Image: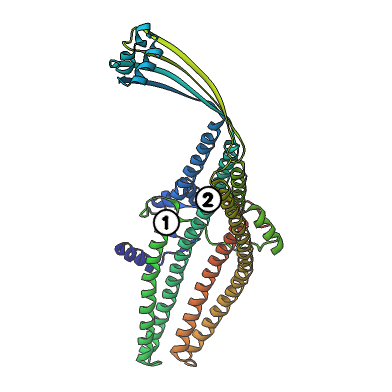
Amino acid sequence: MWRSILIFTALLGLGLDFIGGVPAAAQGDADVKSALTLEEAISTALAHNPFIAAAKSGLSASEERIVQARSGLLPQVDFLESYQRTNNPMWAFGNKLKQGRFSQQDFELDELNNPSSIDNYTSAFLVSWSVFDSGQTWFGMRQANLASSAQAMALEQTRQNVIVRTVEAYSGLVLSGEDLKVVDEALETARAHLRMIEERYKNGLTVKSDVLRAQVHIAELEQDQVTAASRVSVAMAALNAAMGVPTDQAVVPVDPLIRRDPPEKSLEEWIHTALSKRPDLLMLDFQEQAADAEVKKAKAAHWPAVHVNGSYEINTEDLEDSADNYTVGADVTLNLFSGYRFSSRTQEAVFQHQAAKENQRAMRQQAELEVQQAYYDVLSADKRISAAEISIDQATEALRIIEDRYKTGLLPIVSLLDAEVALYRAKNNHNQALYQHVMARNRLAQAAGVLNEDFVLCRTNFK
């Protein structure tokens, strides 16, 4: 990695310009395959990020639980094949009856009390149907549907989180490239000033210390350049991780950091949007409804239950002669006393429902706070960009004036170096302001629950 950094740094030293966050050298055919737009990065992340894959699997699992819950409404049919050998008087007597082999001599007391061992093969179809199970299946189906809806909201929340992380990583890579460009420009300026200072020193117009101070300043900038180049590599790995691809994949971002229009909605409108559209709030709403269904389900356990069952079986001793029979029945069950189990379960469900409602209320308050913070961050980020642009203009003009005065001997070297550093910092602050502007916009959209690919790519207005 360090070798790559040094090569990249050397190329920068040759004066390669950064165009829109991409080195000019990267514009050639050799690197076209690695060029990456923000839209492509988001699309790749949504397709390959493991968190989204896990959330999709969770949603599929919740849909299968709906099928399981619905199965309680349908009859259950089983097939049974069994073998039994016994000399138990009761079972031997019964097996002979089921096989249709019972005779008059089987009534003899000795045969009844001490029967010979008997074999019995049974083939049976068993049917059971809970016609009404105290409403447990109906409430279970409702809970399963609500759980699936909550999981769908969890998937949407994960999608938004992945988009935010991808935009942050992409913008971070662009920012690191812009920072590297700023260092390169500062080095070019510092080296040009060093040549001027060395010329003045040769002509006896300045002292040796000015040359040494300028060289120290260049050495410090070269260290900053190495650090900035390493940040490019780290930012690239972070973007790859956000997209769910190998972290050593080489990518070149082509979309620069852009200043967008401030939001047109009022803070109250953004809060209203958040309370109605945030997927995490909707997920909590479904969970609260499921908790309410659990209360009703627990209370319904006191209701009667009706079950129907039946069977058809064939019994034989030697697999040749056989006899068949059937059984059909129904039962009604009404619990009269459960040892307070049902009432305790109801109270437990009531408390869990209350906890769900309180969690929902707390999350709504948190959502309002997040929207307010993100909203004011967007406004302040926009002002920071304006201030940074003014600072660059002022620092550029100040450096020009101080450079002219230093040439005429009116100002010391420290003033020139300070002016260089001021311009260097002003450009870095401007890049940071643009980055924070992008992050604040996306945090506001996420806090309001409206973050998607179209919003990030400004296909929809910031309204």
Note whether residue 355 is visible.
Answer: yes
Q: Nearer the viewer, residue 190 or 217?
A: 217
**Dots 1 and 2: beta carbons under 8 Å?**
no
Image quarter of the N terminus: bottom left
Q: Find residue 374 and report its horizontal and vertical position in percent.
A: 60, 65
Q: How many C-alpha atoms fall within 10 Å of the one at disc 2: few (<14), some, or many (≥20)? A: many
Q: Nearer the viewer, residue 91 or 272?
A: 91
Identify which residue is drawn at 68% across, 57% down. Answer: 463
Say which quarter of the image contains residue 381.
bottom right
Task: Please determine whether, in this image, residue 146 is positioned above or below residue 378.
Answer: above
Which amino acid type is marked by label 2?
A: Arg
Identify which residue is drawn at 29% across, 17% down. Answer: 114
| The label number, if any, that marks residue 26 in the structure image | 1
Identify which residue is drawn at 61% across, 51% down. Answer: 288
Q: Find residue 103 and report its horizontal and vertical position in percent.
A: 37, 7
Q: Nearer the viewer, residue 17 or 305?
A: 305
Residue tagged 2:
159
Say which quarter of the image contains residue 230.
bottom left
Identify which residue is drawn at 46% across, 71% down. Answer: 182
Q: Find residue 45 and report its horizontal and vertical position in percent.
A: 47, 50
CA gap between label 1 and label 2 equals 31 Å
Which amino acid type is marked by label 1?
A: Ala
Q: Nearer the viewer, residue 217 or 200?
A: 217
Task: Please determine whether, in this image, residue 126 is positioned above or below residue 159.
Answer: above
Nearer the observer, disc 1 or disc 2?
Answer: 2
* Label 2 SS: helix
* Label 1 SS: helix
Dot 1 or dot 2: first in sequence order is 1
| The label number, if any, that marks residue 340 in the structure image | none
Q: Find residue 328 and report its horizontal and vertical position in percent.
A: 53, 19
Farthest residue to the front: give it.
Answer: 109
* Tally of numbered discs: 2
